[in-house]
Amino acid sequence: MDAASESLIVRVLERPSPDWDSFVAVAPGASIYHRSAWVRLAKDVFGHTVACAEARNAAGALVGVLPVVRQKSLLLGTFATSLPFCNYGGAVCATPEVALALMNGARSWADEAGCAYLEFRDERPLPGDWSVRTDKVTMELSLPPTLQELSKQLGSKLRSQVKRADREQPSVHIGGAELVPQFYDVFARNMRSLGTPVYPRRFFEAVQESLPDQSLVITVSRNGVVGAAGFLMISGGRAEIPWAACSDEAKPLAFNMKLYWE
């Protein structure tokens, strides 16, 4: 699918172009979730249909990208998101004009794909006749140069909760693929107890395999039993914990606070 103007060509492809990742790596506003490895996960793990909208200037240089994933649900029907399985997505480009062209290209694709709606998870408002939701927020904490400064910044209440966990002499492990099974065990049990559908373990294995330098797992255990675990994504000077869980037995021991501190 192509849409062209005098100086801009927008195409919607089935897979990212070879220069997709090099563009995302330096583009302002891009997240790790815009990388081709993340986009491919939706198809490789879940079998979803992927659309990769890209904008090029008259010289053929890439000036904008917008990944979209189509999903089917018994409850929600057919819909498209940029991007699922994370909090961020939307168009990555330098100007509102390019963003609008990409979004309109994605809308045409979603219409042809039979989607009931299309959602962009942008961090800022963009042009166009789109309905806007403002019921979600992103919370960020700037980290000071030292742990001592961070401890002071958090305050006495949080420090006491971390110390409560330390009295149990927990073991903390930080790693990659080898810790995914331990993370998934406590995460899946927690999600099921909440009545929330849980991603398959192969999804987290695929994330670690595809982005080993940008993902890691932290576990907090006692006597060989993992009580809390988190899956971190790290990119562009920012670390976030999109998935974390603490067992009911470990919550009174403040293992969740120990996890976040570590």
Image (spheres, rainbow, N blue to C red):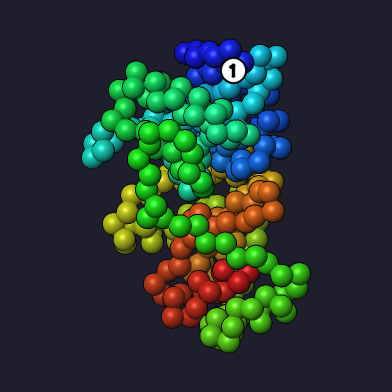
Looking at the picture, how far across and down is residue 69, in whole percent?
A: 44, 31
Mark 1: few, some, or many residues within 10 Å (few <14, many ≥20)? Answer: many
Which quadrant of the figure has residue 9? Answer: top right
Task: Answer above or below: position of 195 versus 8.
Answer: below
Question: Residue lying furthest left in this view?
Answer: 75
Looking at the picture, how far across and down is residue 195, in whole percent?
A: 29, 57
Q: Is 71 in front, or is 183?
A: 71
Amino acid at dot 1: Leu
Which quadrant of the figure has residue 151? Answer: bottom right
Q: Which residue is mark 1?
A: 8
Is residue 79 visible in the rendered image? The answer is: yes
Along the horizontal axis of the image, is 111 left or right of 218? Answer: left
Task: Answer above or below: position of 207 versus 129.
Answer: below
Q: Is 205 in front, or is 149?
A: 149
Label 1 element class: strand
Kindly identify the residue that appears in the image at 33 percent across and 57 percent down: 192
Kindly identify the residue that appears in the image at 31 percent across and 27 percent down: 115
Kindly identify the residue that appears in the image at 59 percent across and 17 percent down: 8
Which quadrant of the figure has residue 251? Answer: bottom left
